[in-house]
Image: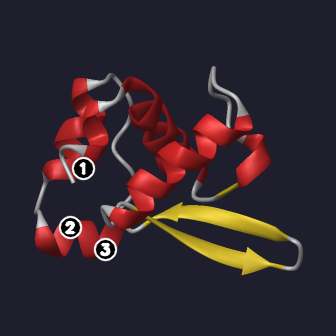
Amino acid sequence: MLSALADPVRLKIVAELARSGGIVCGQFDVPVGMSTLSHHLKVLREAGVLRVTPQGSYRTHELRREEMERRFPGVLDSVMRAIGSDPPPA
């Protein structure tokens, strides 16, 4: 998980998800193209950081907050504080 969070773009994605709760793929505010964004989302998904929920023709991305907290207590909050973002709500 920490390896997945080591990239600045992925940290920005996680911070956006922490603030919003869920984002449709094309609505992330990151400085990369769609193919690179897809790669970053795949890395985060495979690391167990986010889940993807199909909703019609869209896919919503959400943090796996509860699962991460059970596996790595306090890590997500610490990462959010370190990058100057509010920790996600409990």
Question: In which quadrant will I find the N terminus?
Answer: bottom left
Residue at the (33%, 67%) spot, across then down = 48
Q: Is residue 53 above or below residue 88?
A: below
Q: Nearer the viewer, residue 80 or 25?
A: 25
The amino acid at mark 2 is Glu
User: At 46% across and 29% down in the image, what residue appears?
Assistant: 9
Q: Are marks 2 and 1 in contact (CB under 8 Å)?
A: yes
At label 3, the amino acid type is Glu
Q: Are marks 2 and 3 in contact (CB under 8 Å)?
A: yes
SS at mark 3 in the image: helix
Give the percent coordinates (x, y) of residue 83. 30, 24
| Location of residue 6 (image quadrant) | top left
**Percent of width and height locating residue 34:** 72, 38
- Crowdedness near tag 1: few (<14), some (14–19) or many (≥20) residues, C-alpha within 10 Å: many
Which residue lies under the disc numbered 1?
76
Q: Which element is circle 1 on? A: helix
Q: Which residue appears farthest toward the right when viewing the image?
A: 57
- The numbered disc on residue 20 is none
Q: Is residue 43 left or right of residue 66?
A: right
Q: Which residue is mark 3?
A: 66
Q: Earlier in the sequence, mark 1 or mark 3?
A: 3
User: Disc 2 or 1, which lies upstream in sequence?
Assistant: 2
The residue beneath circle 2 is 69
C-alpha span from label 1 to label 3: 10 Å
Q: Position of residue 10 (x, y in %)?
A: 43, 37
At label 2, counting other C-alpha atoms closer than 10 Å, the crowd grade (few under 14, some 14-19, many 20 or more) is some
65 relative position to 55: left or right: left
Pick whichever, 35 or 16, lies toward us: 35
Q: Is residue 17 above or below residue 83?
A: below
Residue 72 image point, x, y percent: 11, 63
Amino acid type indicated by mark 1: Leu
